[in-house]
């Protein structure tokens, strides 16, 4: 394949989630002509949050949206670990990696995060096409739709997530996942004084991770009770029910929960696609290539790393084949290591063993992502 000329490279991005929007933005900043195809007609409105961890904020700065995310989110530095009575055991301090001007970490609602990425991508020149479902993609760069004429791109960035039939079409279906634990996500009113993250346990051993996301809201991620593993297809609970049995600040959160919207359930298995992420003009990114447990914010953080690496490789030039091969070389082993550590953290939530050393897992992960991808 011929080396590409940056300004004329046509990149088609399939999927307008976090990975698709971030890669579209990075590609446009790298000089490509970018079109995004997203099947959902509307702006994403999900009542959940994203924890922007230090490495992710550093990488958001690199693709030009760090400041916008800080403005839309709630900065903090520490995670306070509480016992079952709500007393502080210890704090995990985050190291700021995005420079002296920006905070270490922040919480942000998923809707604000998406909107910030989308606005930046449009400002960088990306063309957004919503309500357009891609029915097939080919290694020759073809992109087919249910009701529109096909398009051909030089590079097709496949960012359709882990559940899309397109993923199975390109990679073959993943082996069925045995029913596993489902984590519950919801937003709640922010109690006065909750201005850092909190990791707390209920009396029955359930764990909750709470992150401030705005002056008025916190985002909550809650693990199921140990050894009771409701699958993601089980009906979701109300926030008030989920918070029953927690003491201290989380108890107060439960007392104030309005129960207007049920929690969102997501299971936390890792699925790093076994097949090559690159075939001809196709390159898989984000959950399509590497679905991860959300622990340490790494599922989203790895999607942003994909975007940074894609942008750098586009800047460098070469052929599309060389670019994609270099992308896989830089990303696959690192993501597999992150998957192993986040899987350990997910297990700590649901199958706790006294020997599991969460601070050690946290330090190992921090060391790994401290170096940019
Ligand atoms: C409820 C929930 C909570 C989460 N919490 C966390 C967390 O706390 N921390 C964390 O790190 N990660 C979390 N994640 C995961 C994180 O959001 C993802 O890893 C990250 O956003 C990357 O996802 P993605 O963009 O690759 O895929 P997705 O977010 O799945 O986006 C894929 C997009 O592709 C579109 N699409 C699919 N098929 C087609 C098609 N055929 N044609 C056109 N468009 C298509 C979909 O509509 C969707 O918009 C959570 C995810 C969920 C669902």
Image (cartoon, helix red, strand yellow):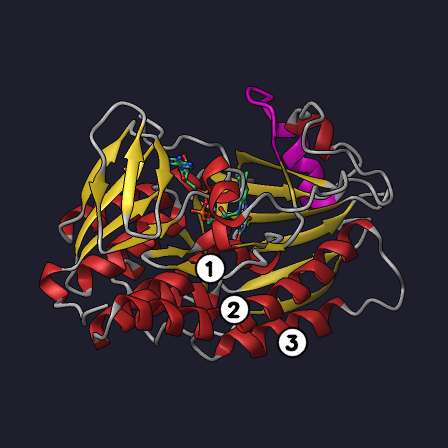
Q: Give the structural element (helix, strand or loop) at label 3.
A: helix
Q: Is the residue under label 1 in contact with that under label 2 (CB below 8 Å)?
A: yes
Query: Which residue sits furthest left?
Result: 7
Total marks drawn?
3
Q: Position of residue 70 (x, y in %)?
A: 34, 56
Q: Is residue 249 magenta?
A: yes
- Number of residues whose C-alpha sits closer than 10 Å to that of mark 3, classed few (under 14), some (14–19) or many (20 or more): some
User: Is residue 173 shown left or right of residue 6?
Assistant: right
- Can residue 48 be seen? yes
Q: Residue at x 67, y 66 (%)?
A: 341
Q: Residue at x 62, y 43 (%)?
A: 221
User: Is residue 356 shown left or right of residue 33?
Assistant: right
Judge by depth and name the residue closer to the eye, 251 or 142: 142
Q: CA distance from mark 2 to mark 1?
A: 9 Å
Residue 277, numbered circle: 1
Check the image and report above or below for 216 versus 233.
below
Q: State which quarter of the image contains the N terminus.
A: bottom left
Q: CA distance from mark 1 to mark 3?
A: 26 Å
Which one is closest to the eye, mark 2 or mark 1?
1
Q: Give the structural element (helix, strand or loop) at label 2.
A: helix
- First in sequence, mark 2 or 1: give its number: 1
Q: Quadrant of residue 337?
A: bottom right
Q: CA distance from mark 3 to mark 2?
A: 18 Å
Residue 364, numbered circle: 3
Check the image and report above or below for 43 versus 81.
above
- Number of residues whose C-alpha sits closer than 10 Å to that of mark 1, classed few (under 14), some (14–19) or many (20 or more): many
Q: Position of residue 332 (x, y in %)?
A: 52, 68
Q: Position of residue 367 (x, y in %)?
A: 57, 79
Q: Residue at x 13, y 50 (%)?
A: 125
Q: Position of residue 369 (x, y in %)?
A: 52, 73
Q: Is residue 316 magenta?
A: no
Q: Which residues are magenta?
A: 248-265
């Amino acid at each position: 394949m011929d080396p590409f000329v940056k300004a004329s490279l046509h990149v088609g991005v399939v999927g307008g989630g976090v990975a698709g929007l971030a890669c579209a933005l990075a590609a446009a900043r790298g000089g490509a002509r970018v079109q995004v195809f997203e099947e959902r007609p509307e702006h994403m409105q999900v009542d959940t949050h994203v924890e922007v961890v230090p490495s992710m904020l550093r990488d958001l700065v690199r693709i030009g949206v760090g400041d916008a995310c800080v403005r839309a989110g709630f900065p903090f530095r520490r995670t306070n670990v509480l016992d079952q009575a709500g007393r502080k055991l210890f704090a995990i301090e985050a190291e700021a990696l995005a420079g002296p001007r920006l905070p270490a970490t922040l919480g942000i609602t998923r809707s604000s995060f998406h909107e910030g990425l989308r606005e930046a991508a449009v400002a960088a020149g990306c063309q957004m096409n919503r309500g357009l479902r891609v029915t097939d993609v080919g290694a020759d760069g073809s992109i087919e739709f249910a009701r529109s004429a096909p398009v051909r791109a030089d590079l097709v960035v496949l960012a359709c997530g882990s559940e899309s039939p397109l993923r199975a079409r390109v990679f073959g279906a993943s082996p069925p996942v045995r029913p596993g634990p489902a984590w519950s996500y919801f937003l709640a009113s922010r109690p006065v004084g909750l201005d850092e993250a909190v990791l707390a346990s209920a009396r029955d051993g359930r764990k909750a991770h709470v992150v401030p996301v705005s002056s008025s809201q916190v985002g909550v991620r809650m693990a199921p009770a140990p050894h009771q593993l409701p699958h993601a297809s089980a009906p979701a609970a109300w926030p008030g029910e989920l918070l029953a049995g927690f003491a201290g600040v989380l108890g107060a959160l439960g007392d104030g929960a309005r129960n207007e919207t049920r929690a969102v359930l997501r299971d936390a298995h890792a699925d790093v696609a076994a097949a090559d992420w690159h075939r001809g003009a196709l390159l898989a990114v984000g959950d399509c290539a590497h679905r991860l447990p959300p622990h340490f914010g790494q599922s989203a953080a790895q999607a942003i790393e994909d975007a940074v690496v894609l942008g750098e490789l586009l800047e460098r030039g070469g052929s599309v084949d060389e670019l994609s091969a270099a992308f896989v070389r830089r990303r696959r082993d690192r993501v597999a290591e992150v998957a192993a550590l986040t899987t350990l953290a997910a297990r700590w939530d649901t199958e706790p063993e006294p020997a599991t050393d969460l601070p050690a897992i946290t330090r190992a992960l921090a060391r790994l992502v401290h170096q940019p991808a």
